[in-house]
């Protein structure tokens, strides 16, 4: 089978290419994700974070139980068929012990059956609930958050009786799963989702959708504690900007959304006072690992670590902890036993991989946007940005994250 792309193998001590034949006893991890396309920024952050995570977890040796770690990068280009071929290539040709990725939820879902076919571990980076829900199999483990964690944390942050919400989301697994989870969680908190709006992933005109959202909320009774438009959106376009231009405040409507990567948070400067809950912002956690992570990232890249950089780091911490728990084995059954119930440390603090669906339980962060000029977010510029200032940590025990698989 011809290679769809050139696979670059990184021996992490030098981060230089090395033939797989020279490392028969190495720990081979294929990072199969969207290095090009609309989510390329996410993929690059995940890649950087994972390498830094292995460095930290191994005290710079880049070895786990005496075995070198190799990462083989493969670019899905956000194509599900291509991703399936690359995951199969990783298991069959590269003899990868673990596949990490893809980052797109829809693409990730297409690859899960390949892991089951080859009986090898896959660690998807996408967010859709279906990854550890309806389309799950026993070889799937996820360290990043799922749609329910995004949704439940935001519902905990804002939800209470008398809160009415209309949602806007992208019309694919990430958006629809996110809204379903948010609606369920908001109702548990006593609030109500009164309207759902779905648009194509490449949508740039949000005017008509905004008018429908306004119409659903503006004259509604029973919303004494607040009327909100809540957005679940990935990528560069930001529907909240256009909605804000149309002055929702004239109807008493406020905007809300979850956290995001730093480039997206620049546009949050338009929304001072907006609240939500997010997965990670580098100033929110206070622990030794995050201190090292932030300091080293600043020194190496002259910029702050971001949302997905922290996820990549955490993925490396989980893999290292599991292989150590398995006494250095990369046998699939030994790894499954090690991953199930695994407690491990990350830049966010402690995480726990739940036995039932292999989803990592973790804290989330309730924030309020404050506008600041920042010269530490990016290497090449100072920006006026919407900074997600921490209101409080939302503990694992505060979030009832549904188990959605059929084990």
Image (cartoon, rainbow, N blue to C red):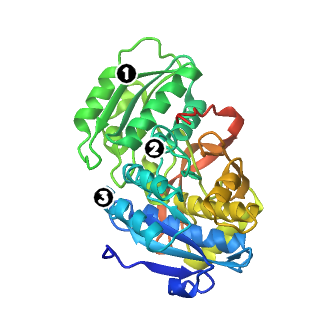
Where residue 208 is drawn, which disc sits there?
A: none
Residue visible at 59% across and 53% down in the picture: 143
Disc 1 and disc 2 in contact, CB within 8 angstroms: no
Q: Quadrant of residue 326?
A: bottom right
Expressed as whole percent of the image width and height from the top left, the position of residue 6 reads: 37, 79
Which residue is rendered at x = 56% and y = 17% of the image? 161
The mark closer to the camera, 1 or 2, is 2
Name the N-terminal-most of marks 3 and 1.
3
Disc 2 target residue:
128
The answer to whether residue 234 is above or below residue 149 is below
* Left or right, 148 with reference to 197: right
Q: Nearer the viewer, residue 363 or 407?
A: 407
Query: In which quadrant of the rendered image does the C terminus lie?
Result: top right
* Mark 1 or mark 2: whose residue is earlier in sequence: 2
As drawn, the label of residue 217 is 1
Quadrant showing the N terminus: bottom left
Quick one: which residue is furthest to the top in this view?
Answer: 221
Q: Which mark is residue 81?
A: 3
From the top left corner, tell me how far across and down residue 316 is, in percent. Answer: 62, 65
Name above or below for residue 9 compared with residue 358.
Answer: below
Of 237 and 309, nearer the camera is: 309
Number of residues whose C-alpha sits closer than 10 Å to that of mark 2, classed few (under 14), some (14–19) or many (20 or more): many
| Secondary structure beneath label 1 | helix
Measured in 3D between alpha carbons, the distance from the residue under mark 2 to the one under mark 3, in whole angstroms, is: 18 Å
Instruction: Give the image location of residue 253, x and y in percent.
Output: 41, 28
Q: Gap in Å between the C-alphas at discs 3 and 1?
A: 41 Å
């Amino acid at each position: 089978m011809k290679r769809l792309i050139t696979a670059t193998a990184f021996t992490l001590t030098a981060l230089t290419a090395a033939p797989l034949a020279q490392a028969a006893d190495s720990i081979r991890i294929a990072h199969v994700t969207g290095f090009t396309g609309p989510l390329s920024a996410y993929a690059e952050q995940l890649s950087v974070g994972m390498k830094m995570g292995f460095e930290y977890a191994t005290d710079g040796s880049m070895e786990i139980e005496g075995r070198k770690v190799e990462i083989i990068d493969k670019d899905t280009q956000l194509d599900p068929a291509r991703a399936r071929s690359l995951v199969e290539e990783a298991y069959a040709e590269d003899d990868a012990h673990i596949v990490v990725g893809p980052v797109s939820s829809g693409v990730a879902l297409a690859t899960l059956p390949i892991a089951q076919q080859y009986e090898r571990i896959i660690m998807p980076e996408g967010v859709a609930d279906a990854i550890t829900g309806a389309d799950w199999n026993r070889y799937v483990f996820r360290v990043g958050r799922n749609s329910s964690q995004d949704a439940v944390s935001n519902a905990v942050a804002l939800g209470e009786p008398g809160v009415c919400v209309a949602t806007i989301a992208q019309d694919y697994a990430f958006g629809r799963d996110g809204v379903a989870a948010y609606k369920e969680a908001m109702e548990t908190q006593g609030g109500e989702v009164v309207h759902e709006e779905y648009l194509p992933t490449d949508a740039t005109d949000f005017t008509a959708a905004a008018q429908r959202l306004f119409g659903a909320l503006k004259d509604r009774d029973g919303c004494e504690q607040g009327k909100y438009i809540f957005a679940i959106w990935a990528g560069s376009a930001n529907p909240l900007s256009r909605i804000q231009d149309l002055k929702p405040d004239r109807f008493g409507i406020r905007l809300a959304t979850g956290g995001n990567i730093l480039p997206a948070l620049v546009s949050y400067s338009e929304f001072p006072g907006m609240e939500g809950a997010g997965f990670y912002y580098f100033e929110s956690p206070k622990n030794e690992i995050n201190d090292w992570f932030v300091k080293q990232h600043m020194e190496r890249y002259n910029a702050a670590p971001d949302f997905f950089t922290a996820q990549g780091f955490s993925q490396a911490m989980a893999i290292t902890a599991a292989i150590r728990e398995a006494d250095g084995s990369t046998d699939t059954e030994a790894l499954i036993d090690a991953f199930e119930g695994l407690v491990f440390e990350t830049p966010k603090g402690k995480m726990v991989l739940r036995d039932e669906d292999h989803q990592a339980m973790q804290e989330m962060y309730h924030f309020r946007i404050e506008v600041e000029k920042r010269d530490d977010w990016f290497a090449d510029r100072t920006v006026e940005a919407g900074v997600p200032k921490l209101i409080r940590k939302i503990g694992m025990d505060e979030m009832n994250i549904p188990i959605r698989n059929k084990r």
